Structures are given as C-alpha cells and as structure tokens.
C-alpha cells in the first residue's frame, strides 16, 4: 500500500518567506493545499497546489468569507492519529489528514491604523477561517504542526531536517498560536469598545508585544522585559529611535517616561532633568540652550547621572554644556550632527530621537489607560491629561498674584503635577528652584523643596499638588520669602492657611483640581 503523502495547508496574509519555506516543504515530501492569493502566489512560483475547493467539494463563496470552514478541512485537522475510531471515521468520510497548517491572519491591526478607514473596512478584515484553523490545529498539536509566525519557518525546517518534529517543539508552536489569537481578539475587542465609547469594559484585555529582554529589573535579582502597546502611541517612548549607547534598562525606561510626560506639558523650548521618575530641574527659555542651563542650575547636584527630556533639537552649544557632567539618557526631538559628534564621545550616554515628542498623551477614548499592576489585580484609570480649568481659578487672599507671579504659578503647577506625592515645587516663571517629593506629610515636602532651593527660594512661588491641611506650609513660605502659592484648596482648614497668607502678604490661588501621583 502506497504511503500517504503529508499535506500542508498554507494560507497567509504576510507572504514573507513563504515561497522559500514551501520549497523546503515540497522537498520534505509535503503536498501543498492553499487558498486565494496564497495559492496564486505559490502557483506563480512554480508549485503544484491543491485548491481548498478540491478538498471541500464546495466553491469559495461570499467574497471569500467562506473557504476553509468545512468538515473536510477541520476533520482532517482534528482527527487524533492515535485514536483508531477517529481514523476509521476519516476513511469512511473520504477525508485525508492535514499534517501542517501555515496560517497568518488578515491584517486587522494594519487596517485600523490606516487614516480614514471605515468601520465596515475594519470589520471585513476580521479573520474567521484563519483563527478557526489555527485553533483546531493547535488543539491537535501532537499530530499537526501549526505555524503562525514567519519567524518560526527556519526553526520548523531545522526540526524537519532531523527527520521528525519533536513533541516539545509542537507544544511551543501550540502556545504561539493561542498567544497570537488572544492578541488578535484583544485588538478587535478594543477597537469595537472604542467605537462604542465603552471606557471600562467588564472584562479587560490589553495587547502588548515584548520588544526587549532586559538584563534585570529594578534590582539585579529581578528578571524583566519591556512590552509595548500593540496600538501605536505617537510621542511615546516606544516611538523613540535610539541613536547611541547601550540598551535601556528597566529603570532607564521608567525614569525616562516620567521626564517625557512632564516635558509634554510645555509648548515653549523646555528641558526636564529627571531622577527616579521625578523632576529635579525644569527650565524653559527662548532656546534649548537657555532652557537647559535653567534646568541644570535648578539642582546641579541631583541632575548628575540623571535623564534629560528636551522638546527641541540639541545643538552643539547645548551638547557642550551637557557633556561637562554625566547624563545617562537624553531624549529629544533630534540632535545636530555637531551635537552628535560631541555627545558620542561619552561611552555611557544613551541618545534617543523622538521627533513627535510634543504629541500629547492620548486619553482612554482611544484605548490608552494609566495602569498599575498590584498582586492579584490591576488598577486602571484615565491618564491625568488635565492641568486646571481656568474658570475654577480663584484668588482667596487679600492680595492677588501679579502677572509675573501668575506666570510662575502656572509654570510650577505643571511641574508639581508630575512629581511624586506628597509634592511641593517652588520656582519662578521659567525654572524650578526647589522640589520636594514623595514625603509622607506635606510640611516635610515643603521644607525639602525650600532647603534644596536655598537662597533661590526668596522671590519664588510655591505649587502644592494637594491642599494644605494646616497653615504650617504657609509659615515655611513666609520664612523663605516665597511670595505666592497655588494649590487645589478643599481642606476644612483652608481659612487657617488663607489667614496666614494674609498676615505675610502672600498671594494664594485655589484651582480646585488635585494632582496626586504615586
């Protein structure tokens, strides 16, 4: 009795490497079954191809919506070769087993990212037959080799070269299938939720792709990876192109993201110096050079070994100044060739180019959320995309802020929003002078900010991310020579702080919006 030839069903949207892969399959004795565009491409490459309709005895129909959804396909995939009853039924039905499935799916993600795509176009690119075949083949993994990722073609061929595809490798391919279809379904459900305006679904699924394996996490004994959102996020760190330096670490990415979020608050040329995801100096100016000098002078001690987020082009003059100290990372719109020549003399610096650095973070209406993983759960919220509402600004003291003070208050309010709570930021209209962050009470944060500022505190203004529970922060402001305060207000003891401000002729405004950050 003639031995049955093995069969491989090949149907791919991404045709990368498929002709070369099938050439080897044929050499290893496989017959090729295919559909639509894949069958055409293989025939044009000179292969003999069995059309799916020849297997099913039924024509492709409904504009290609129905091709492989047929018992002659799925019985051939799901029959367990070790089960005599299964094999007897196949023989009685005249169905031949299928031994390999090579499938990748309709490009749903690429479709919805196209400008101007309609809902109908998106829905038409939801693959039905592909995932069904993949799942069927993966369920019967011990008998069917299932390949969903072109990156695995070479691995499959290496296994075939040994004479037999190992069970262990088949289980790996099985895992790849269910991970792939899970992400595919997640992209679809997220898109549909966005279309309906569903903000917080009852069951949440989020699709992320591993883009970097790291040497370690926050500490050397922790393992870590970097996963990026499957949906493109303009202006995000995952959009940055690394021009120089070794790979970013877990802490590098977390800290750079903090600096990046803050610099987006500014339209004018601005430099944010950051350490441990907290700002240590922020400066704005007519030029990036001016902005850098102000940020550096805000805290020349803490900026050492820190991260710079720059919403403009780094030129040679700025690069010369930066090169005088150790900076771990610079993320900027770009670098002039002269700046690159200067900065790349430093072996341990990383340079990231992010042309759309000024793009604001997207809100949850587009599937972007602020998420914090806790053991056994996930906290999900909107991003804090607001700063304040102008109509809610209220002068609560006898003296209103001057024009210069108001400009300074708004500048430092942007900074305190991105500083770990409890947070106090003091500064002028174009730079910070002292920052106190992450304290367990507000008075310590105020004292820390004032101590960091030193003599520069005099004439500065203060921003507090939440209300003053007691007048002690105002008392510290008066001692330091701080002239104006911005805070949310809302404490039952607000009047005590207001009275203390009036005693020292300090202007204070309430904005009615808190900015806790943990």
Image (cartoon, grey):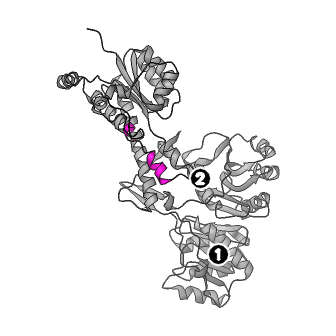
- Residue at point 64% right, 64% down? 265
Residue located farthest toward the left when viewing the structure as drawn: 85
Mark 1 secondary-structure assignment: strand
Q: Is residue 128 magenta?
A: yes
Q: Position of residue 172 (x, y in %)?
A: 38, 31
Q: Position of residue 69 (x, y in %)?
A: 33, 36
Residue 74's disc number = none
- In 3D space, how far apart are the residues under numbered discs 1 and 2 (Cα atoms)? 30 Å
Of residue 286 and residue 139, the one placed in the foreground of this image is 139
Which span is picked out in magenta? 115-130
Q: Position of residue 87 (x, y in %)?
A: 21, 23
Q: Is residue 279 left or right of residue 96?
A: right
Q: Is residue 386 magenta?
A: no
Query: Is residue 460 something that shows in the picture?
Result: no
Q: Position of residue 79 (x, y in %)?
A: 25, 27
Question: Which residue is the site of mark 1?
Answer: 462
> Mark 1 Cα within 10 Å, few/some/many (few <14, many 20+)?
many
Residue 236's disc number = 2
Of residue 5 and residue 211, the one placed in the foreground of this image is 5
Mark 2 secondary-structure assignment: loop
């Amino acid at each position: 009795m003639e031995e049955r030839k093995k069969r491989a069903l090949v149907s791919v949207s991404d045709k990368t490497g498929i002709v070369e892969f099938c050439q080897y399959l044929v050499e290893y004795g496989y017959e090729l079954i295919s559909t639509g565009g894949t069958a055409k491409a293989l025939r044009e490459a000179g292969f003999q191809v069995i059309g799916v309709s020849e297997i099913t005895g039924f024509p492709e129909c409904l504009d290609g919506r129905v091709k492989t959804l047929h018992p002659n396909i799925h019985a051939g995939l799901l029959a367990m070769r070790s089960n005599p009853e299964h094999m007897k039924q196949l023989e009685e039905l005249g169905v031949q087993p299928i031994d390999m499935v090579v499938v990748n799916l309709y490009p749903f993600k690429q479709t919805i990212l196209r400008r101007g795509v309609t809902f109908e176009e998106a829905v038409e690119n939801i693959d039905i037959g592909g995932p069904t075949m993949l799942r069927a083949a993966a369920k019967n993994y011990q008998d069917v080799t299932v390949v969903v990722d072109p990156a695995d073609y070479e691995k499959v061929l290496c296994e075939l070269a040994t004479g037999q595809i190992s069970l262990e490798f088949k289980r790996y391919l099985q895992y790849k299938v269910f991970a792939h279809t899970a992400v595919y379904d997640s992209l679809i459900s997220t898109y549909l939720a966005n279309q309906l305006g569903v903000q917080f679904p009852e069951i949440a699924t989020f699709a992320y792709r591993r883009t970097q394996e790291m040497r370690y996490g926050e500490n050397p004994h922790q393992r870590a990876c970097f996963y990026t959102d499957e949906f493109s996020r303009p202006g995000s760190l995952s959009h940055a192109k690394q021009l120089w330096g070794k790979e970013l670490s877990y802490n590098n990415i977390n800290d750079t993201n903090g600096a990046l979020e803050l610099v987006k608050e500014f339209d004018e040329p601005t430099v944010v110096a950051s350490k441990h995801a907290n700002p240590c100096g922020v400066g704005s100016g007519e030029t990036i050079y001016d902005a850098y000098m102000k940020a550096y002078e805000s805290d020349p001690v803490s900026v050492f070994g820190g991260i710079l987020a720059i919403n403009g082009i780094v030129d040679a003059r700025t690069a010369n100044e930066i090169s005088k100290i150790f900076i771990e990372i610079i993320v900027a719109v770009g670098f002039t060739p002269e700046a690159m020549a200067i900065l790349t003399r430093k072996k341990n610096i990383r340079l990231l180019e992010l042309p759309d650095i000024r793009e604001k973070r997207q809100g949850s209406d587009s599937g972007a959320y602020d998420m914090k993983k806790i053991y056994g759960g996930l906290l999900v919220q909107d991003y804090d995309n607001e700063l304040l509402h102008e109509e809610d600004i209220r002068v609560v003291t006898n003296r209103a802020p001057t024009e210069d003070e108001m400009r300074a208050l708004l500048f430092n309010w942007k900074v305190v929003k991105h500083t770990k709570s409890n947070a106090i930021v003091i500064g002028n209209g174009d730079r910070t002078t002292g920052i106190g962050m992450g304290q367990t009470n507000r008075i310590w944060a105020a004292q820390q900010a004032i101590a960091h500022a030193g003599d520069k505190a005099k004439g500065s203004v203060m921003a507090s991310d939440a209300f003053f529970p007691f007048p002690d922060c105002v008392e510290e402001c008066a001692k330091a020579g701080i002239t104006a305060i911005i805070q949310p207000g809302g404490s039952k003891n607000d009047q005590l702080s207001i009275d203390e401000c009036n005693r020292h002729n300090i202007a204070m405004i309430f904005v009615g919006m808190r900015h806790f950050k943990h």
